[in-house]
Amino acid sequence: MATIVIIRGDGIGPEVVEEGLKVLKAAARKVSLALEFQEALLGGAAIDATGDPLPEETLHRCKQADAILLGAVGGPTWDSHPREKRPEQGILGLRKALQLYANLRPVRLFPSLLEASPLKREVIEGTDFIIFRELTSGLYYGTPRGIDKSGDEERAVDTLSYTTSEIARIARLAFQAAEGRRKKVSSIDKANVLMSSQLWRRVVMHVAQEFPGVTLEHMLVDTCAMQLIRNPCQFDVIVTENMFGDILSDEAGAIAGSIGLLPSASLGGAGGLYEPIHGAAPNIAGTGQANPIGTILSAALLLRYSLKQQQAATTIEAAVEQVLAQGYRTPELEQPGTELVGTQRMGDLITRAVETA
Ligand code: IPM
Ligand code: MG
């Protein structure tokens, strides 16, 4: 029996996870898949309960699990805490401890949401790409790091560091994915300025030799930010450094119509961590307005990648598409002629669509 750790987290996290769990259970029932669930604390909720954003017990449970479904962490309550006692350190620590170096962020448009994007229909129609964000190195983890003071002057340092093997392993996964798609990899860097990007580019070119059927292009991150808006259809697989991937994937969320729609899968080590790409959104927490689709689609990725339940995953994705096609929308996607629903109702509708599929 597969064991899934559920981490509700902070802000809208608990609300969206509740719906993700409902849909996951329905899809598992459908294919007679037995799942065991365990709850664990992370981020702000863990700080409040234990003083630690990544308690030992959470880490232990996650290491034993087949997969983890996570909502979001963070919020103003903990903003003034020192770096190591911030909720975000919980998630960064977990990614690192489980060696989840590959963060997959698929960006696919739902036909019924073409008008919901801030971009014109003719620009976005046909958009279907996946971002491979490196997740356990780069600017998020490099040392030295810190702020020191001399007299009145303070100096802050972050370090962007990559090794050959860290680049090669994420590049390889990106090329493998491209082989099963439209056979194009866009490697995003800032090689005109950064040393880390020069190594990145060199290693990616080397890995590309193992995949003669896949076309590789290099693009500077600033150009990529522009091209995503001008012509998102040109991308198939994007592979990039941790922080560039963080920034570009939020941009991609806007293209799709709402950041609340995008799921992610973090892979590489044992198990896998599945979470929507959005944050804890404290401004709408508790109001029942959050879009649970990013988490629901993350549950689909969990079934696909960690449990190898392709059919159950596809059932969830089709259910989401169906409910959106029927015109149901959470507030951030509301338009004339659509029917406004809250987090829970959206989850119920998708659960029902899974059950009747
Ligand atoms: C994300 C988030 C996280 C990140 C935060 C919450 C630390 O923005 O998953 O994209 O920057 O990786
Ligand atoms: Mg982010």
Image (cartoon, grey):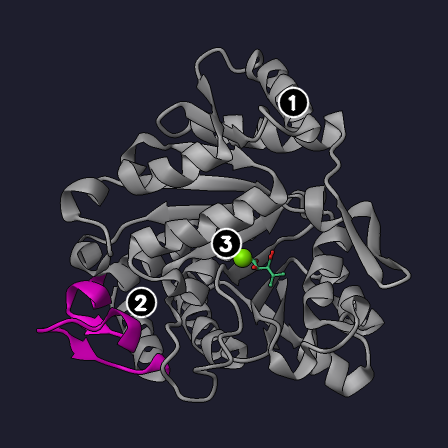
Q: Residue furthest left?
A: 337
Where residue 155 sits: x, y (%)? 81, 54
Of residue 118 and residue 157, the one placed in the foreground of this image is: 157
Categorize mark 3 by other alpha carbons within 10 Å: few (<14), some (14-19), many (20+).
Answer: many
Q: Badge 1 is on which residue?
A: 198
Q: Secondary structure at mark 1?
A: helix
Q: Badge 2 is on which residue?
A: 354
Of residue 46 and residue 146, the one placed in the foreground of this image is: 146
Residue 233: name its quadrant. Answer: top left
How far is disc 2 from disc 3 in space, using C-alphas?
20 Å
* Type of the residue with mark 1: Gln
Of residue 89 and residue 308, the one placed in the foreground of this image is: 89
**Residue 130 in sight:** yes
Q: Badge 3 is on which residue?
A: 264
- Compared with residue 347, is residue 233 higher up or lower down, i.e. above or below? above
- Compared with residue 299, is residue 188 higher up or lower down, i.e. above or below? above
Is residue 338 part of the magenta span, yes or no?
A: yes
- Compared with residue 105, is residue 226 higher up or lower down, i.e. above or below? above
Instruction: Name the side, left or right, on which 148 lies relative to 357.
Output: right
* Type of the residue with mark 3: Ser
Where residue 112 sits: x, y (%)? 17, 58
Task: Say if disc 3 is inside 8 Å of ligand 1.
Answer: yes
Q: Are marks 2 and 3 in contact (CB under 8 Å)?
A: no
